[in-house]
Amino acid sequence: MLAGAAAAIIALAVAAPPPPPTPGDSLFAVAWRKTLVEPYLLEYKPFEPAGPGIDPLTGMVVVATRDGYVQAYSADGKDLWYARLVGPYLAPPTIADGLAIIAGLDGRVFAFDAARGEFRWMYRYREEFGSQPVVAGDLVYFATLEGTVLALDARTGSWMWHFRREPSGKFLILGVGRPAVVDGVLYQGFADGTVVALDARTGAVKWDKKVGRGAFPDVVASVQVAKDRVFVASYGGQVAALDRRNGTPIWESRAPEAYKARIDGDLLVVVTTRDVLGFDARTGKDLWSIAHEGGPLADPVIARGLVLVPTGKGLLLLDRRSGKKVRFFTRGSGATASPAILGKRVYVLSNAGELIAVDLQ
């Protein structure tokens, strides 16, 4: 998996037959669904890695799709606004403080009025944006596939600071974690296996710790922060808990080819290229594991006693406590992007470009 040209993210394909009806049962009920992207002529294996972002205040959902469109819908499925940009996108939009912000692999960031879709500002950079934007205070943060963390003024799009970790020049694992901003500190992992804590206002380095080792030490999972610890998963196989204040190691476990991670209370979920693993966040002890089939590219989500893992082939639903498979949700084309969750409402974007609003029971 290479952090290469943006064009490599979009696949050409033969138009597939319509997906089968979405089932409903005691676990979930489909509230509504919309086809956002019509099949391209000669399109083969459509691919939607970005997925939906959700407004925690209104329930509005904003989606960036492979055709370059950004579209907004109300919680009841009403069309609100759209914008035709370029993309493609590797991560979902963020909706915060009245703005919808989306960053693309074309090196451009756009901000729109979230309610009306009116253009607010655009910022252009020389690298590919691979993470979901993170708004904290009056700044918005991004991470690029080439090893840069960037801070902009959220209201104007003006550059505030950037921190760059020079690439090692080797083969890189595709992806980058979402910046984690907690109590004025930004935590970010890089392809050389390091985790860096930065002052969120200035970008000044607070501490720098090497976690990933081996031929592919890349930290492409978002750094997870809980209480006094940060949790790091490296593709090289290292899963570690560090002291938030100074990066001192607390424990380390193994998860070869760890790609994504999510913390939820005392449970740390790590998704590798083959398995989903549950660790005790206090001790690093293995709690459970289950094999999956597919190519996970996006973050898992934990909600309502479930772990939802996009595997490319679909959405794998696991019991949070035991790790046992509860259901596998697919529309035929699969699902690569992370679902967006607010309360019991889950939004899933299929690889065919269908947005499905599901209510967990």
Image (spheres, rainbow, N blue to C red):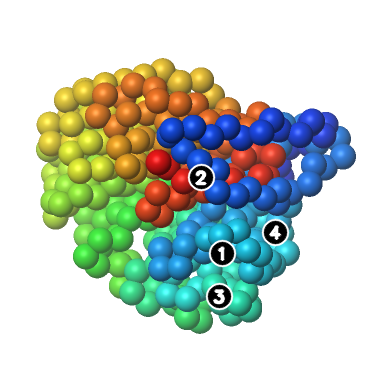
Q: Earlier in the sequence, mark 3 or mark 1?
A: 1
- As shown in the figure, which amino acid type bears the numbered disc 1? Ser
- Measured in 3D between alpha carbons, the distance from the residue under mark 3 to the one under mark 2, in whole angstroms, is 23 Å
Residue 174 placed where, x, y %? 53, 38
- Between tags 2 and 4, which lies in front? 2
- As shown in the figure, which amino acid type bears the numbered disc 4? Tyr
Asked if 119 appears above or below 188 in the picture, the reply is below
According to the image, label 3 marks what residue? 115
* Residue at 73% from the left image edge and 64% from the top image edge: 84
Question: The C terminus is located in which quarter?
Answer: top left
According to the image, label 4 marks what residue? 69
According to the image, label 2 marks what residue? 358
Q: Earlier in the sequence, mark 2 or mark 4?
A: 4
- Measured in 3D between alpha carbons, the distance from the residue under mark 4 to the one under mark 3, in whole angstroms, is 17 Å
Asked if 174 appears above or below 75 in the picture, the reply is above
Neighbours of disc 2 within 10 Å: few (<14), some (14-19), many (20+): many
Q: Front-most of 73 and 291? A: 73
